[in-house]
Image (cartoon, helix red, strand yellow):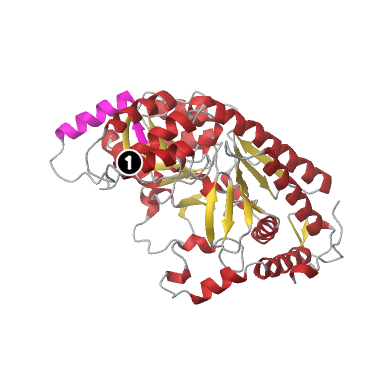
Amino acid sequence: MLTGAGEGDALIGGVAAFRIAAFKAREDAVYASRRPRTRAMLDAAPSAWLSGVPMHWMLDWPMPFPLLVEKAWKAHLRDCDGHELNDFCLGDTGSMFGHSPAPVAKAIRRQARRGLTAMLPTPDALAVGALLTERFGPFHWQMATTASDANRFALRVARAVTGRTKVLVFNGCYHGAVEETFVKLKDGKTSPKPGLVGQANDLTQHSVVVEFNDAAGLEQALAAGDIACVITEPVLTNTSMVLPEPGFLEDVRRLTRAHGTLLLIDETHTVSTGLGGYTRVHGLEPDIFVLGKPVAGGMPAAVWGLSAEVARRYGMFNAAREPGYSGIGTTLSGNPMQFAAMRACLSEVMTEKNYARMDRLAARLADGLSRVIAGRGLPWHVVRVGARVEFICAPGPLKTGAEAYASHRPHLEAAIHLGLLNRGCLIAPFHNMMLVSPVTTRKQVDALVKAFNRVTEHLTAGDLSVPKATA
């Protein structure tokens, strides 16, 4: 039950702003007091990294200073001060099947003695092609190192075979570092996303944005006849999670076919759905399929596949084009280490049995979080796609990217994330995403629900003083 807000106090996601600020200050103090060694190591290290970290988004975690990871195993992390954490971030899907799955680690050790890169296929590559088709469908496959690259290469093919230049994305989508997708709807018009660095091209010339779940808007955009490809996630996953309404993805397939537009399904996040991803579980029929992050069990690898018809058209295009660099491919993509890790992951880790376990525990997590939210009377909701769970600090369900953008409560979410971390549970920093892996235990799930209960208790009615033991 919500209490503690006096007259005139602002509410953020149903929680008094003063309580959020006080709780975050308390949790900052707790975090810092528990990590003297980490703080000393950061202070002593030379500032060779830009802003002090290897990747800028490592500063997006809501901590007073970065966490230094000493070890990651199964669904656990240990920091440099010896604190063990239940890891529900799992590398933001990169380690969706747990850290260093045993079959993958064994394959890496074996391949390390046989060479790391050679620009030629290996016997593992032949096996991986067959496994990809078995898991995801009869596509003609190519390798990449990241899903961003895979999407970029696939969009080049889409433009080549259609002779069109424009790409359609849904508002709130996420497809990595693909420039064509750095757009959003603003006042009903396609506009560049805010905050872009060094943007040189006018993205609105070759990108079109439509709201997710808006079949009429999609049909109107496709009617112009200049869209080469619709690139979409089956579920919006990098804002607040938005599920497709019944029939929407079927409408997307029907309309793209009617207007001669290709359909690219990016499963990089929604592979959490089940064996074969959302595409296989729900019987989608994309022209192009993309998957990155967990496909090699945590090693950098991604794949993109073309349907038989698109592969045929691309073959005709290649036969007729002038010789020269295609703009597709990077030197380290398709290296023997990728194939060794992918073969182990696809055959021994990405299994029906593991997905069934992930689904059961994720359902337990979603139910537990929902009960806490209801018990506190908070205007929040929980969404789940297989092993992927999110709590959203706004009423739901959400139907569009615009609603997803509007649902974010950055200060409230940062306070919750840090509160969970201080109680032994790590979730993704960018939004309220949690993943359950095959090696996550019921005890860990219950610990996260308990921590969530304690954090929401403090935010709504609990004591906000710093505990004496850690002050």
**Whether residue 133 is situated above or below residue 72 in the rendered picture:** above
Amino acid type of the residue tagged 1 in the rendering: Gln
Q: Nearer the viewer, residue 57 or 266?
A: 57
Q: Nearer the viewer, residue 292 or 33?
A: 33
Q: Left or right of 44: which side holds 370?
A: right
Q: Nearer the viewer, residue 176 or 401?
A: 176
User: Magenta stretch containing residue 410, yes or no?
Assistant: no
Is residue 234 at least partly visible in the picture? Answer: no
Secondary structure category for the residue under label 1: helix
Q: Residue 293, image x and y in percent?
A: 45, 43
**Count of numbered badges drawn on the protein:** 1
Q: Residue 393, image x and y in percent?
A: 70, 50
Predominant SS along the magenta part: helix
- Residue at image mark 1: 111
Residue interval drawn in magenta = 304-320
Q: Residue 2, image x and y in percent?
A: 84, 54
Q: Residue 384, image x and y in percent?
A: 63, 37
Q: Left or right of 232: which side holds 26?
A: right
Q: Left or right of 262: which side holds 426?
A: right
Is residue 157 at least partly visible in the picture? Answer: yes
User: Magenta stretch containing residue 317, yes or no?
Assistant: yes
Q: Nearer the viewer, residue 233 or 204?
A: 233
Q: Quadrant of residue 84?
A: bottom right
Residue at (38% x, 64% y) in the render? 198
Q: Quadrant of the C terminus?
A: bottom right
Disc 1 crowd rating (10 Å Cα; few below 14, some 14-19, many 20+) is some
